[in-house]
Amino acid sequence: MKTNKRNIFLIGPMGAGKTTIGKQVAQLLKMEFIDADQEIEDRAGAPIDWIFELEGEEGFRKREVKIIDELTLRQGIVLATGGGAIVAKENRIALAGRGAVVFLETSIDQQLERTRKDKRRPLLQTDDPKETLEELAENRDELYREIADYIVSTDRGSVKSVAKDIVDMIQSD
Ligand SMILES: Nc1ncnc2c1ncn2[C@@H]1O[C@H](COP(=O)(O)OP(=O)(O)OP(=O)(O)O)[C@@H](O)[C@H]1O
Ligand SMILES: O=C(O)C1=C[C@@H](O)[C@@H](O)[C@H](O)C1
Ligand SMILES: [Mg+2]
């Protein structure tokens, strides 16, 4: 594929590595990297947990729909989406239609380990984050698969090696 013309969109659950691996993929391909969560925070001038507190999850999702529509219209970007971006149908349509969608898959245990110290994920501030992650996976797994052009496991291997695998896969298509 002509990576300089098309976009690459990373989807998957919290802690799958969308942000970390996305940055590496962009560097390897000399494309621009954008993180949707970061963009939402920058525009709101407030961190995600504040947005959830002040506007509820509904307010956050409205902001997310707007940002995803805007960003997916750009050209030549690597976009790391938020874990729940695929829930809204309009986001799935925008992502599927405007770039190559890569679903980063990982086990619940890895997700737990990788998200343990981070307060940026208000949905995991529960008594039992493992149960929460299991429920989210139950509801969202089919939505990730519905729009995925590529599916990559991030359970094993370094960030660099997974990023390289993604680049090779997309370029050989
Ligand atoms: N393949 C990997 N191997 C080891 N550690 C990883 C890997 N991918 C990500 N990590 C680590 O896991 C943590 C969470 O990753 P990251 O923030 O990229 O996830 P995310 O998919 O963007 O999550 P969110 O949906 O919440 O934004 C980071 O500290 C990162 O360094
Ligand atoms: O899985 C989710 O619904 C979320 C994932 C994060 O990336 C953030 O977008 C936010 O914390 C919500
Ligand atoms: Mg992220």
Image (cartoon, grey):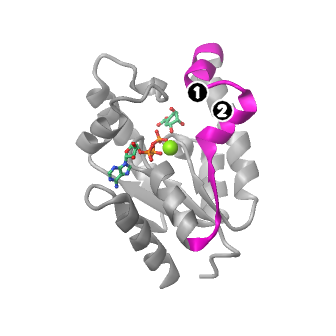
Q: Image height check: is 63 above or below 96?
A: above
Q: State the residue in front, 92 or 111.
A: 111
Q: Which mark is residue 123?
A: none
Q: Is residue 114 left or right of residue 96?
A: left
Whole-percent x, y for residue 120 in the image: 49, 29
Q: CA distance from mark 1 to mark 2?
A: 6 Å
Vertical side of 50 occupied by 73: above or below: below
Please name the residue that numbered disc 2 is placed on.
41
Position of residue 73 in the picture relative to residue 126 (left or right)? right
Picture coordinates of residue 94, whole percent (x, y): 67, 56
**Residue 131 seen in the figure:** yes
Residue 30 in magenta stretch: yes
Residue 162, percent from left and from top: 37, 65
Residue picked out by circle 1: 48
Residue 173 visible to the viewer: no
Task: Look at the numbered disc 1 and say if its residue's Cβ is closer than 8 Å to ligand 2.
Answer: yes
**Residue 34 lies in magenta, yes or no?**
yes
> Mark 2 Cα within 10 Å, few/some/many (few <14, many 20+)?
some
Q: Quadrant of the N terminus?
A: bottom right
Residue 45, picture quadrant: top right
* Rendered residue at 27%/55% (across/down): 155
- Mark 1 / mark 2, whichever is N-terminal: 2
Question: Where is residue 58, by image quadrant?
Answer: top right
> Is the stretch drawn in magenta largely helix, strand or loop?
helix
Picture residue at 58% right of the left edge, 27% below the top? 48
Q: Name the residue located 55 percent from the left edge and 22 percent from the top edge.
A: 49
- Amino acid at dot 1: Ile
Magenta-tinted stretch? 29-54
Please report contact status of discs 1 and 2: CB closer than 8 Å, yes or no: yes
Q: Element under label 2?
A: helix
